[in-house]
């Protein structure tokens, strides 16, 4: 068991341009932990410092410690951050169209079950591409997008499509009670400072019989063992503050009064690319040309890693991406 001095933690190995704070386990409140990985911001290079992903000694939860404060949001998510920028916007962008199609397919069954007039909320909706696609596929439903920041161009596009905007972090957002028939949290729970209270807020906003669909990295992914000491893409330093496996995400949702309907593995080709970018940068430096080979816009490589994970899941392995669907009891 390790009890760390809070002042020492808040300044350990991290550049001063991101304000940091020590953290306790958000699940059980314990301050005892073991460091499982250290790494840097291999994707956006916002700081050259190292960060630590730790595992709680008491309940096994994975979390970033120390972590950026919520005041550091603009530094953690710069203007060129993927979900804010046009890099994943549709139109002539093939990667954006593929991403949108994959996301739609993954949520197809829960969307198909929605009645006419249903209300759908996408938490961490980014540039809103998925909401626009949902609006076109189901013009009979009402869609809402929540994110901490919307560029003016994005806001204009979404509002022109009749999409309702909620601009605030989930931790402070004012959500209507018992309203939404479906809430999507795609690759967002791991970014929250207060995931437990965030899920409680979502549970309160769900209508009776409403569903919450979560996708998030899986620390039991079979490939994490190859990059576990720091460059596994699921760590995504310093933005992934809390990480889960099937058991821990189910426990989180059960504590909020939600009933688990199903859990499944999903391919994680982006995590594979991030992992390989990280290990190349650790060994060859930040500007190594080889890292560019593993860029997430390399479509043949993404397809190859997706196929690899599909085969792995078919033989019983856990992948580094997971989906859970839970329902609020009637």
Image: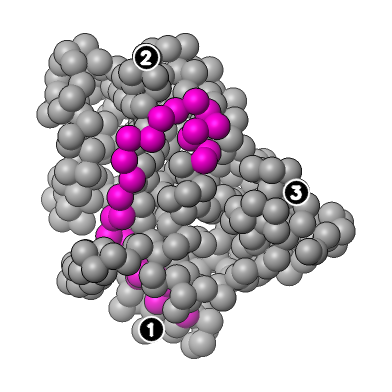
Residue 330 marker: 2
Is residue 19 visible in the rendered structure shown here?
A: no
Task: Please state the horizontal and vertical placement of residue 311, each as a whole percent of the image.
Answer: 20, 69
**Callout 3: few (<14), some (14-19), or many (20+) C-alpha neighbours within 10 Å?**
some
Task: Please state the horizontal and vertical placement of residue 8, each as a whole percent of the image.
Answer: 85, 62
For the residues labelled 3 and 2, say whether their Cβ atoms are less than 8 Å apart.
no
Q: CA distance from mark 2 to mark 1?
A: 55 Å
Q: Is residue 33 above or below residue 161?
A: below
Residue at the spot of label 1: 289
Q: Is residue 270 magenta?
A: yes
Q: Is residue 153 above or below residue 247?
A: above
Q: Is residue 146 above or below residue 115?
A: below
Q: Is residue 265 magenta?
A: yes
Residue at the spot of label 3: 30
Task: Please state the horizontal and vertical placement of residue 191, each as a whole percent of the image.
Answer: 52, 46
Q: Nearer the viewer, mark 3 or mark 2?
A: 2
- Magenta span of residues: 251-279
Quarter assignment of residue 115: top left
Q: CA distance from mark 1 to mark 3?
A: 42 Å
SS type, badge 1 = loop
Is residue 67 shown left or right of residue 181? right
Q: CA distance from mark 3 to mark 2?
A: 34 Å
**Callout 2: few (<14), some (14-19), or many (20+) C-alpha neighbours within 10 Å?**
few
Name the one closer to the observer, 177 or 312. 312
What residue lies at 24% left-to-right and 68% top-to-bottom?
315
What residue lies at 41% left-to-right and 30% top-to-bottom?
259
Mark 3 or 2 closer to N-term? 3
Q: Nearer the viewer, mark 2 or mark 1?
A: 2
Mark 1 or 3 closer to N-term? 3
SS type, badge 2 = loop
């Amino acid at each position: 068991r390790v009890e760390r001095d809070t002042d020492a933690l808040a300044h350990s190995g991290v550049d001063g341009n991101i304000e940091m704070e020590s953290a306790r386990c958000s699940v059980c409140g314990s301050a005892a932990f073991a460091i499982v990985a250290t790494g840097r911001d291999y994707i956006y290079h916002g700081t050259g410092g190292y960060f630590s992903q730790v595992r709680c000694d008491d309940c096994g939860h994975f979390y970033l410690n120390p972590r950026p404060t919520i005041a550091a949001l603009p530094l953690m998510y710069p203007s060129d951050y993927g979900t804010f920028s046009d890099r994943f916007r549709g139109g002539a962008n093939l990667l954006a169209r593929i991403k949108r199609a994959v996301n739609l397919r993954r949520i197809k069954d829960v969307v198909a079950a929605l009645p006419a007039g249903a209300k759908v909320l996408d938490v961490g909706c980014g540039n809103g591409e998925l909401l626009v696609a949902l609006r076109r596929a189901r013009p009979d439903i009402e869609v809402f997008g929540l994110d901490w920041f919307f560029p003016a161009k994005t806001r204009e596009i979404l509002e022109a499509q009749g999409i309702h905007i909620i601009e605030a972090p989930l931790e402070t957002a004012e959500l209507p009670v018992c309203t939404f028939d479906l809430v999507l949290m795609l690759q967002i729970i791991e970014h929250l400072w207060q995931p437990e209270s965030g899920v409680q807020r979502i549970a309160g906003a769900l209508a009776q019989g409403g569903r919450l669909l979560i996708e998030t990295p899986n620390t039991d992914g079979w490939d994490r063992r190859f990059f576990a000491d720091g460059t596994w893409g699921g760590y995504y330093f310093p933005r992934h503050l809390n990480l889960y496996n099937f058991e821990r995400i189910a426990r989180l949702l059960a504590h909020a009064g939600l009933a688990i309907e199903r859990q499944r593995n999903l391919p994680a080709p982006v995590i594979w690319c991030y992992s390989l970018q990280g290990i190349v940068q650790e060994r060859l430096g930040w500007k190594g040309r080889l890292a560019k080979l593993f860029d997430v816009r390399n479509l043949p490589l993404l397809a190859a890693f997706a196929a690899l994970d599909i085969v792995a899941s078919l033989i019983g392995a856990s992948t580094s991406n997971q989906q859970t669907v839970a329902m609020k009891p009637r």
